[in-house]
Image: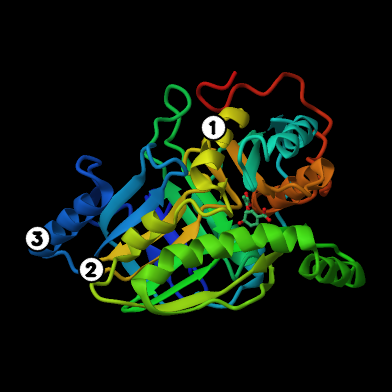
């Protein structure tokens, strides 16, 4: 395993980015859940003050904010261990010799059902008063051996060196008696917000195309994305929303007039790096994350209408998926990534999430293929890279004798 393996199996929080790693030592570290009462921001300030008064070295709020603001967050106040930049990848990181595990898959909803849902959404957008809505689907994977979140995280970090790689104990109950608590593990390509003193940054993404193994086709896809009117329009909603929220707080805000390409191992995205200088009194990174979330990259435009449509149209609860994962220290500095390209792991089960922005010009089959391609990040990290590639979701391999048991409470 990588020498910088960011967390032991019991670590309740680990985040590793190209700039730093941040880990809560599950064995010896000091941490406690952030009490939900009285609002997140006052609770965070009180917890940080208390921890400082008690002599903690470097108390931070760490964890995850849910997609729906009314759902429970998974936040801790912790004496986190900060490390430097991630060392370069070692050949061992990717576990090349590991045999593909035996597994079963179930889609919720299936790629076809999802495409039908997208068609209905496209049809109803204007009647619902929506310019954009982000619709997601899930993939349930059941393996024979329990998954080790730390190992999955190490593989994600090896395969996605530019990402915000995270593992966060969700705080939810396990899915059955004796089941371990679920951990949200993922490799997000998207920076919701980072604050360093008065400097603020955000890197919204929207508009996507799957990578292709042939370099020429891969380049063609990237160029097509950069000039796609549908994707540029879908992207503009996100940048406008982020700029609109940040501008009143900033003495200066730089918003490039056009997006550039961001590449992950599996996807091309349109991205716009937004940077600014905050005015006094400086909002904390946690306040900024709560202010910006949910952006139209994961929700839609207008935001409230899109959130309600997602609640009606998606046949599952997002929980922490499409929320935000990150940290905020006692000075208010911090960094929050959008919780994407992730899975909730509990024991032998993983629930993968992937969504796509739907606008008037969306093609249902392409959006289904896009979500299929987005699953690849987690499938690869689970050792299921050989599962046939996108377009849609891979067919189940030969073998399943019995149906996959319900892996997620409340979804028969
Ligand atoms: C919703 C997801 O991704 C988001 C949606 C994108 C899009 O619609 O093009 C691109 C990047 C992300 O902001 C996801 O990965 O699940």
Residue 342 horizontal/vertical position (percent): 57, 49
Please indicate whether residue 64 sits to the left or right of residue 212 in the image. Answer: left
Quarter occupied by residue 249: bottom left
Quickly name the residue at label 3: 54
The answer, for residue 7, to whether it is visible in the render is no
Please indicate whether residue 233 sits to the left or right of residue 54 in the image. Answer: right
Give the SS element for disc 3.
loop
Quickly name the residue at label 1: 311
Q: Residue at x 91, y 72 (%)?
A: 216
| Quadrant position of ligand 1 | bottom right
Number of numbered markers: 3
Check if mark 3's residue and mark 2's residue have beta carbons within 8 Å. Answer: no
Quickly name the residue at label 2: 58
Residue 340 horizontal/vertical position (percent): 57, 52
Residue 386 horizontal/vertical position (percent): 80, 49
Q: Quadrant of the C terminus?
A: top right
Q: Residue at x 78, y 62 (%)?
A: 229
Check if mark 1's residue and mark 3's residue have beta carbons within 8 Å. Answer: no
Q: Residue at x 37, y 69 (%)?
A: 248
Q: Quadrant of the N terminus?
A: bottom right
Please tell me whether mark 2 or mark 1 is closer to you in this view: 1
Judge whether 279 appears above or below 96 on screen: below
Residue 179 horizontal/vertical position (percent): 45, 29
Quarter occupied by residue 200: bottom left
Colour scheme used in the picture? rainbow
Which disc is residue 122 wearing? none
* Number of other residues with Cα within 10 Å of mark 2, as a class: few under 14, some 14 to 19, many 20 or more: some
Q: Nearer the viewer, residue 24 or 295?
A: 295
Q: Nearer the viewer, residue 412 or 149?
A: 412
């Amino acid at each position: 395993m990588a020498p910088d393996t960011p967390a032991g199996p019991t670590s309740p929080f680990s985040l590793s980015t190209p700039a730093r790693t941040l880990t809560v030592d599950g064995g010896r570290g000091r941490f406690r859940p952030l009490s939900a009462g009285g609002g997140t921001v006052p609770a965070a300030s009180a917890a940080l003050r208390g921890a400082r008064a008690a002599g903690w070295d470097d108390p931070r709020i760490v964890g995850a904010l849910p997609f729906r603001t009314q759902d429970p967050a998974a936040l801790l106040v912790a004496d986190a261990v900060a490390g430097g930049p991630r060392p370069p990848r070692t050949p061992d990181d990717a576990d090349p010799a590991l045999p593909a595990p035996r597994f079963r898959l179930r889609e919720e909803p299936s790629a076809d059902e999802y495409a039908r849902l997208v068609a209905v959404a496209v049809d109803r957008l204007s009647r619902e008063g929506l310019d954009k809505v982000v619709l997601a689907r899930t993939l349930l994977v059941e393996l024979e051996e329990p998954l080790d979140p730390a190992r999955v995280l190490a593989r994600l970090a090896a395969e996605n060196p530019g990402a915000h790689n995270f593992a966060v104990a969700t705080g939810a109950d396990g899915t059955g008696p004796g089941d371990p608590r679920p951990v949200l593990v993922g490799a997000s390509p998207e920076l919701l917000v980072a604050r360093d003193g008065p400097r603020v940054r955000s890197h919204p993404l929207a508009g996507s195309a799957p990578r292709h193994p042939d370099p020429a086709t891969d380049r063609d896809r990237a160029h097509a994305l950069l000039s796609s009117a549908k994707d540029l329009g879908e992207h503009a909603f996100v940048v406008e929303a982020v700029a609109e929220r940040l501008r009143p707080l900033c003495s200066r805000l730089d918003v490039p007039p056009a997006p550039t390409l961001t590449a992950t191992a599996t996807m091309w995205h349109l991205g716009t790096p937004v940077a600014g200088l905050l005015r006094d009194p400086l909002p904390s990174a946690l306040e900024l994350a709560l202010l910006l979330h949910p952006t139209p990259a994961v929700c839609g435009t207008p935001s409230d209408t899109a959130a309600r449509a997602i609640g009606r149209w998606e046949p599952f609860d997002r929980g922490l998926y499409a929320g935000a994962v990150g940290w905020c220290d006692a000075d208010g500095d911090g960094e929050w990534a959008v919780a994407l390209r992730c899975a909730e792991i509990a024991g032998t089960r993983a629930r993968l999430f992937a969504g796509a922005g739907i606008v008037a010009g969306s093609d249902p089959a392409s959006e289904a293929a896009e979500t299929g391609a987005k699953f690849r990040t987690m499938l690869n990290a689970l050792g299921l890279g050989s599962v046939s590639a996108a377009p849609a979701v891979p067919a189940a391999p030969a073998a399943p004798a019995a149906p996959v048991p319900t892996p997620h409470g409340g979804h028969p």
